[in-house]
Structures are given as structure tokens and as C-alpha cells.
Amino acid sequence: MGGSKENQNHLGSLMPSSNLQGGSRMESVKLMKEMTQNSRRALSNINQNIMEATQKPCVVNRTDPFGRYTAQTVQHCPEQTKKLSLLAPNPSYHMNCTITDIEEYEDVGDNGVPEFVKHTEAMLDEIDRLEEVEMEDVEEPVMDIDVCDAKDPLAVVEYIDEIYEFYRKIENTSCVSPDYMAGQFDVNEKMRAILIDWLIEVHYKFELMEETLYLALNLIDRFLERQAVIRKKLQLVGVTAMLIACKYEEVSVPTVEDFILITDKAYKREEVLNMEKLVMNTLQFNLCVPTPYVFMRRFLKAAQSDKKLELLSFFIIELCLVEYKMLKFSPSLLAAAAIYTAQCSLYQFKQWTKTSEWYTNYSEDQLLECSRMMVTFHQKAGTGKLTGVFRKYSTWKYGYAANMKPALFLLDSD
């Protein structure tokens, strides 16, 4: 090798091998890209250095961490000038720089660009591709929402999944036909809406459990689907269904006289008891049905909800209880769509996590039709004559949820 030993420059290692071997794949890729970007300008000037060099150029090998090729840079040595040639690929996985013998340099591209520059560009493209692959491989994990309740016997973690699998199997048996009002000759869907809006206020005044409201409304629809009722008896059906639901769900049950009083004594005690018998016999004493409420509790847990999201979700789904057209949706779909709509209202962008999708069994696309209808109900809440739900959720007890802005952007999305 030409030149004195003192004039040979040892460049050392460009990157510690531990960064590539001990770190994660993502970290090594980032470090490699950072190093190559910093050296891009130097590589672009290599051609000029080669053409203008009058001293002896010393070729320095730079091996990439993947061991696929060796790039060369030029240093000026104070002796003779010789041409450069690209060295053979180096299988080493360490980025070492060593002084090598000078050979004829012939590997120049069509535009006079050294081949190692092209290799460096290819290496940068490969790093970019690897980063994209790494990002694609990162998927949102599905959380175990029951792990925190493993020691709570009331959470029944051991068979909670089986319980909700059973609810899903039987939920359609508790649903009614979305056009059952066609079988009624003296009442219609508007009268049903007035009755339910009033019962929501009665439920709120008596401070009853949430389960009681959902069961009472389910009993009303199932009874009206099977039994024709005259107009003046519709309110009697409503208070009787609430009484039955209280007996099933509540610890402290309002008396028959309490419900008679709430109707302004429109009915007698005997009428309430006779209607109770008729309702129970018509429904064959089947009171154990999955309402939207049982799904709401499970799905809110999957959404990791706070109190604000919970109250807004219940406000939205209670608006749906008044609407006859929402009977076409299953209880589980109503619950999932209410939570999705509430999230969109709070955050003003679409949000539906993999965990929510896993536990609800509904994708975002499956919820959009129902969710858009909910947004329209939210938008017009507080207007018109039926404002019972709006007034209920305009109180401090319910976090003024009715004052939240609706997710109007869902109406404009495709």
C-alpha cells in the first residue's frame, strides 16, 4: 500500500455494535436512518472529490449493519493519485471503517454517479420501508376488562362471557316487531311516545332503579304487540307495567295507591290489579329478558367510560326509548350505538376501539345507521312537546348531559 504509515487515517467505528444487537429492531432502524441522513451530503460530494484529487486518494470501507454492501469514501493522502474501485461486499454486521488497497475505479453509473451512492440511496429506501412495516405491524391490543374484578364475587368473572353470550342468543326473543302498531285499532305510535315520555318522568320522580324503567317499557311493547288496547286504557297499561317491573327489580316497591295517585286517580285499585293479571298471563310470566340496560353496563366497561360518558350515553339511549322507529334495532345494537354516539359527541371525532368492537361484536360501520338517527334525536331534544328525557338530563344529578353538543359531523360523513 502506497504512502507512509503515519499518513494512514483510521476512522474508527461509526456506530457501536451494541446499538444494533442489544436494542430493539425499531431503535436500530431509527439510528441507521439518522446516521445515513447525516452522511448524505458528504456522499453527494464524493464524485467531485474523485475528479479533483491530485493527491493519492485513500478509500475507506463503510459497511452497512445488514452486511449487504460496502460504501466507500475518499480521503486525500499526500502521495500519488490512483483511481478507485468498489470493493467486494463485506459480510460483517459491524459498521467498521478500514483503510484498503486502491484499485481501479470503474463502477460509475450512467450519469457519472458512483455505484456506492446508489447503494446508499437504496439503503435509505429499505429503512423507510422497514419503518412502514413496523408501523403496520403495531395493532391496538384488546384489553381484558375483567382482570381488575377477578377478586370481586359479584362480578362473576368466571362466567361473565357465557352470561352475555346467552343474552345475545335470547335478545331477539324479547324484541317486538317494528310495525306492531298496525295491529292496534285505537292507539298509534304517537300515543305510545306520549306514554313513555310520561313514564320516564314518573320513574325519575319515584327515584327508581334504571333496570326498572327498561323492563317496564319492554313489557309495554310486548303486551301491545299481543293485545289490542283502547285509548283510555293505554295509561293503565303503562302504570301496571311499571308496577310489575318494580316488583321484579326494586327492593322498596311503590304501592298500587302510589300509581293510582300519579294518574290523578283515573283508575281504581281493582282495574290496576286486573290489568296486572292480564299482562302477566299474556306474557306468560316471562320477565327475565335482556334489555338495552344490561348491555349498556358491559359495553361502558369495555369503553373505559367515565361518569360524563356514562350519563351522556344513557341520555342518548333514553331519547331512543321514546321513538317507535328505533324498535327495529336489537337491544345490544342500541346500547353499542349509544356509547359510540356519546363518544363522538364528547370528543367530536369518531372513536371506536378494538376493545369495544371485541366486546360488543359490532364494528363502527354497523353502528353508523343507528348512530346517525341518535344524533338527530339529540339535535332536536328539548324541542316540541315530549321533553321529559331532556328535562331529566338537564339537572345536576345527571351531569347536565342534555347540554352536550350533538355529533353533527356524523350526519355529513359517508
Image (cartoon, rainbow, N blue to C red):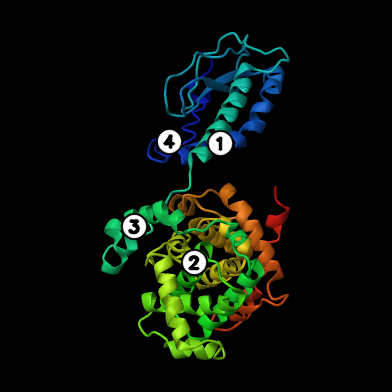
Can residue 305 be seen in the rendering of this structure? no
Q: Are marks 1 and 4 in contact (CB under 8 Å)?
A: no
Q: Which residue is mark 2?
A: 223
Sequence-wise first label, 4 or 2: 4
Image coordinates of residue 145 in percent, x first then y, are: 38, 58
- Is label 1 or label 4 in front? 1
Closest to the camera, between mark 3 and mark 2, is 2
Earlier-in-chain disc, 4 versus 3: 4
| The disc label shown at residue 132, or none | 1
Q: Residue at x 64, y 72 (%)?
A: 191
- Residue 275 lies, in percent from the top left, at 46, 77
> What amino acid type is highlighted by mark number 3?
Ile
Residue bearing the label numbered 4 = 20
Say if 161 sits above or below 269 in the image.
above
Asked if the residues shown at circle 1 and circle 2 are in contact, with their CB atoms under 8 angstroms apart, the answer is no
- Please say whether residue 146 is visible from this viewpoint: yes
Q: Is residue 375 left or right of residue 296?
A: right
Q: Determine which of the numbered discs, if any, sits on residue 241 in the image.
A: none
